[in-house]
Amino acid sequence: MFRKTILILLGLFPALLFADWQVDPEGSYIGFASVKNDLIVENHSFTQVTGIVSKTGEVRIKINLASVETLIPIRNERMQSMLFEIATYPTAEVKSLVDVDEFTSLAVGENKMLNIDMTVDLHATQLKKSVLVKVTRSSDNSFEVTSLGPIVVHASQFSMAEGVEALRKIAGLQSIDLMVPVTFDVRLVAKQP
C-alpha cells in the first residue's frame, strides 16, 4: 500500500521536475571579444557547445575550441593552433552545481536572477568565477540562462598570454588586450527519456 501511494504521489508531479536538461547547441551562444591596437573591438564565438544539467543540479558544459568563429578563416586557424592549442587542449569545460528547483519552479515567461559559482577548465588551468545570470523559462520544457554583463578574464589566468603575443606578432599588430570579456546565452531543453 505504501509503495502504491508513493507511485501515485510521484505521478502527480510533472515529469520535467525529475528530468535532466541538455544544452541546445543551435539555441546557445558563447562569445568573447578581443581588442586590438587599443581601439578595434571584434566579437568572436564558439559554434559547438554541448552539455547537461542533471536533475541533481550538476552542470557540465563542453566547448569545442576548434569551433571558434572570428569570421576570418586564417584567424580561426591561428587561434586554434597558437592560442587554444587544440591539438593538446581540444575543449574547454564549465562545471557548476545549481539548485534545479530555482528554475523549474518558474512559470513560462518568468525569470529570476541568480549568482552561480562556476569552474572553467581551459588550457589545463581551472578558474573559479561567480557569475550573475538571468534564468528565463521560455517554454514548458526549455530555459534560457544568460550572463548579465561580460565576465572579464585575463589571458594569463589560463597561461595564454604567450599565445596572444604570438597572434599579435604574426598579425603585425601594435597590441592585443589580455583582458577578455566573455558572454553567454545557453538554452536548456528537457532531455527526452
Image: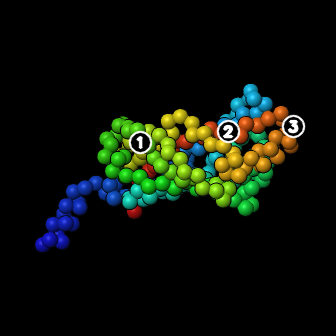
Q: Residue at x 79, y 35 (%)?
A: 175
Q: Of the residues shown, which amino acid type is indicated by label 1?
A: Leu
Disc 1: which residue:
114
Q: Earlier in the sequence, mark 2 or mark 3?
A: 3
Q: Position of residue 141 (x, y in %)?
A: 38, 49
Q: Residue at x 21, y 57 (%)?
A: 12
Can residue 166 be seen in this snapshot?
yes
Residue carrying label 3: 172
Q: Residue furthest left?
A: 1
Structural crowding at the residue carrying mark 2, measured as other residues with C-alpha within 10 Å and reported as few (<14), some (14–19) or many (≥20) = some
Mark seen at residue 179:
2
N-term mark: 1 or 3:
1
Q: Residue at x 82, y 40 (%)?
A: 168
Please give left or right for residue 151 compared with residue 58 in the image: right
Can you say which quadrant of the picture contains the C terminus? Answer: bottom left
Do tag 1 and tag 3 residues touch (Cβ < 8 Å)?
no
Q: CA distance from mark 1 to mark 2?
A: 25 Å
Q: Position of residue 3 (x, y in %)?
A: 18, 71
Work out whether 66 lies above or below 39. below
